[in-house]
Amino acid sequence: MVIPEDIRKVERPVNTVVIDSGKDSPHRYAVRERAGSKYVPGHNNQPVNGKVIGHIIDGKFVPKSENPENPIEHRSYGAIALARSVSEDICSDLQKKFPEKASYIMAISLLRATLPEITDNRIQTEYDDTAVGVFLPDLSFSENKIQVHLKELESKKNDIFDYYRIRSASTESKNLAIAGTTVTWNQGIMGYRAVSDTPFETTVIYAYDIETGDILFLNTYPHREISPTLFLNFVLNNTVRSGTILLNDVPVSEELGEELERYPNLHYIAKEDGSTSDDDDTRFYYTDRSDDRTRFVSDVIQNDLEKIMEKRSVLDRIIRSYLCNGGGACNNDLINTVVTGIAYRMFKRMCDSGLLKDYTFGQVLRDLQNVTRAVNGILETPTRHDNLWADTSNRLLDMMESLGLCSPEPTIPEKRGRGRPRKAGKPE
C-alpha cells in the first residue's frame, strides 16, 4: 500500500521504514528497523526489514516498549470497564453489610454480567484473563472455595435483608413494582455439558424501581408456574410492605387478597377476572384502599402502569438470559440480584449512547470483550490514543468513547502570535 506523504515525513529513527498494516486502528502505520539486505542475482541488493520498534500515531512517532524478560500483559477490558462503571454504588453498599465478601461478590457478578454463560469452573480463568483481576486483586476462585463463600452468604439472611433495605431505601412506595417470570435452563445446551436434554424450569419473583429499572432484590423458586402463593411468599419473606404487584397473568387468590389487606401501601394490578388474554382491550383492575373496593386502572396511574410494563419487558428478558445456565453461583439470590441489576444498567447505558440503534445488546457486549488494554494502564483514566490499547480498532474505540469509558485526546489550542489580532478586511 502507498504510505501517505504526511506519514512518511514524520520524524522517526534513522534506518527505519513505515509499513501500512491495513488495519483501521491507531497502530496502522508500524515503524520497522532495517535489519540488513540480501543479494538477488541480476538486481540491486534488496533491503530486509526487522522488528517493529514503534508506530506513527497522531502525526508523531511513538516507540514500542519491548522487554523480552518482562513483556507487556494485556487483558480484556471493555466489557468489564462498562460493568464496573455502572455498579460503583452497588459495590459501596455491599461493603457496608459484607466487608469481607464484597470483593468476591462483585468479582463474580462482574464476570457473570459480561459473560452470561460463564460457569463456576471458568470463573478463575476469566478472572485471570480480564480486568477484574486488576480491579479486585488477590482473589481465588476454585469451585470448592466458591461453594464455601456461597454457603457463608446463605447463612447471613439478616445481612442480606439489610442490604436489600439499603438498596431500596431511596425508592418510594409508589415507585416499587413486583413481577415474576419463568426461566428455562437446559444444562445440555447452556452449560455445554450433555448431562440432560430435559429443560429445568424455575420461577423468579423480583422487585424493581419503576422509575430507574433497578432490580432491588429477587428470589428464585423451583416451580414451573407463577402462582399467587409465590408472590405471597416473596412478600412475606422479604418483608415487602409497599409497592405494586403485577399480576397480569395470575388470578388473585383469596389467601393473597386477605394478606394484602393487612398492608394499605401494597397494591396489585390484575387482568379482569384473572384473564390471561393479551388483547389490546383487556382491562386491568387496581386495588384502591381509599374506598375498600377494586376499580379499573384510571388515568391517574396509567403513566405508572406504562412504566411498569415497559421496564418489566426488558427486565424479564435480562433475567431469562442471565439465569438460564443454572448451577453454582447462579443459585444464589443475592448474586443474581447484583448481576441482573448490573446487566440492566449496562443495557440502559447502551440505549442512552445510541449504540442499540445499530447493534444488539449481545453484539455490543461481545465487541467490548475484544477491547484489550495493558495491565499497567487498567487503573488509569484511559484516553483514546494513550498507547495502552492492544490493536483496538477505531470502531471499538468509538464505541468506548460513546459509552464514556475513554476520553478523546485533549486538543491543544493554537498558539497566538504576539500583539493584537489583525482586524478583518485589513490588508496584510
Image: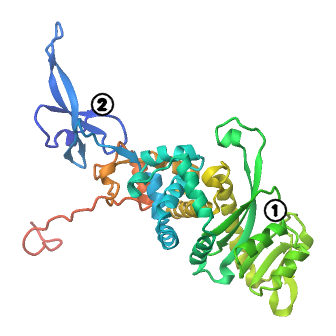
Q: Position of residue 238 (x, y in %)?
A: 69, 74
Foreground of the two, 364 or 133? 133
Is any atom of residue 358 visible in this view? no
30 left or right, relative to 203: left
* Residue hosting label 1: 226
* Residue hosting label 2: 1
Look at the picture and state if 154 lies above or below 116. Answer: below
The span from disc 1 to disc 2 (Cα, nearest Å) is 63 Å
Please rate how many residues cluster around mark 1, counting C-alpha atoms within 10 Å: few if below 14, some from 14 to 19, many from 20. Answer: many
- Amino acid at circle 2: Met
To which quarter of the image does residue 249 belong? bottom right
Q: Position of residue 181 (x, y in %)?
A: 75, 61
Residue for point 25% across, 62% down? 411
Q: Is mark 2 on a helix, strand or loop?
A: loop
Look at the picture and state if 18 lies above or below 150. Answer: above
Look at the picture and state if 64 lies above or below 98. Answer: above
